[in-house]
Amino acid sequence: MWGPRRVMIAGFAIWLVFQLLMLTVALPAMNYPLLMLIYGLRGFGYPLFAYGFLVWVTAATPPQRLGTAVGWYWFAFTGGLPTLGSLVASATIPMVGSYRTLWLALGLVVLGGLLTLLLVREPTGRIGLAPGRGRPLTTLAGSVSIMRRRPRVAIGAAVRVFSTGSQFGFLVCLPFFFTETVGFSTSAWLRLLSVMFAANIFANLFFGAVGDRLGWQRTMTWFGAVACALTCLTLYYVPVVAGPHFAAAAVAAALYGIALAGYVPISALVPALAPRHKGQAMSALNLGAGASTFAGPAIVALALGPVGVEGIVWIFAVLHLATAVAIRFLEPDPEFLTPDAPPAVEDAGLPAGQH
């Protein structure tokens, strides 16, 4: 309805306002309920900006190059959120402390937001993708109801939940495992995290291109789902056996980061399941992406006490294998790759039959 660029501007503004409130009001007051409220409201900003841009990429890219395009998107995404963030924090926290590091984070986000909003001039994202006759409530309802009308889109959203669920779960439990059980320092853990996602950065590019050539489903099944199941276990058992040996743990972390990139083609595959409703399909996919940031930590919260970190890695390994089965049902709609497929602006929020 708004167009990706306006959604990104809204996300950028929300993040800046609530980051400033957190730094100038909630943290100085040491008010935990207020901190929870402001930190939570700040969370509206990130998905609007990040996934707004992903919708822009998928709307503007020809189908035959979409896997490569989303590979570049996840290359940049991973280069920022887990990798640059961890590297900066590992260097600045010992030097200036955590509070000043959060101010530095504000500066980095301002720089990245301005680069995108001032320098990206591709025209598709500057206009609404929904046709003029689209109604707001119908559009929003269609973004959810498409999972009922097109069950394969629902399966794709579920795969998206669990494809990175382990990543967000590990970010909760592994810092304590590596520092308190294995014996790494906090700075060593942050460097290990940087190694993990540095490997993931370049693998995103590789598997995006591989998906275009080998097939999106095949790439996701073997290089994503099966590989993640194996490397989840490796990420736990290698440091258990080797102890605080950074090189060994770094190899295990890098292999897991590479395997995560095997899921990259899902951002190309899900729109292909509903070629006349790409916007709605992307909304469902983005819902799955957002849910993964909740599902992973929720699994850890529920399972850490009963089964410990070892049990958690096995749970995530089994969930990755379950996605391998689900991916088999995600056959692209033949219409997606036909020359006369409707343009991206026709997909955007109308119920089935209203093209």
Image: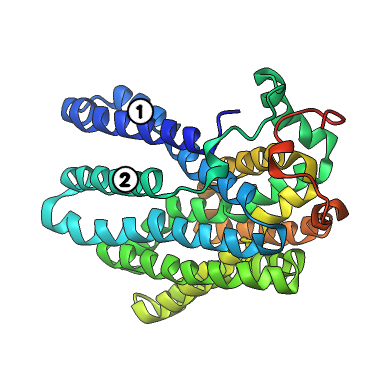
Q: Place residue 326 in its image quadrant.
A: bottom right
Mark 2: amino acid? Val
Of callouts 1 and 2, which one flags the residue occurring earlier in the amino acid sequence?
Answer: 1
Q: Place residue 244 in its image quadrant.
A: bottom left
Mark 1 vs mark 2: give the one in front.
2
Q: Decide: is 165 above or below 226.
A: above
Residue 128 seen in this snapshot: yes
The residue that disc 2 covers is: 109
Q: CA distance from mark 1 to mark 2?
A: 21 Å
Give the side of residue 287 with respect to residue 145, left or right: left
Q: Decide: is 95 above or below 254.
A: above
Residue, far left: 96
Mark 1: which secondary structure?
A: helix
Give the side of residue 41 with respect to residue 351, left or right: left
Instruction: Identify which residue is drawn at 61% across, 67% down.
Output: 208
Which mark, by number, is residue 146? none
Mark 2: which secondary structure?
A: helix
Q: Position of residue 333 (x, y in %)?
A: 85, 52
Q: Nearer the viewer, residue 269 or 243?
A: 269
Q: Decide: is 160 above or below 142.
A: below
Q: Position of residue 203 (x, y in %)?
A: 53, 71
Instruction: Identify which residue is drawn at 54% across, 69% down.
Output: 205
Instruction: Identify which residue is drawn at 42% across, 80% down.
Output: 248
Q: Position of residue 275 (x, y in %)?
A: 78, 46
User: Badge 2: few (under 14), some or many (20 or more) residues near its Cα, within 10 Å?
Assistant: some
Which mark, by number, is residue 36? 1
User: Badge 1: few (under 14), some or many (20 or more) residues near its Cα, within 10 Å?
Assistant: few
Residue 227 seen in this snapshot: no
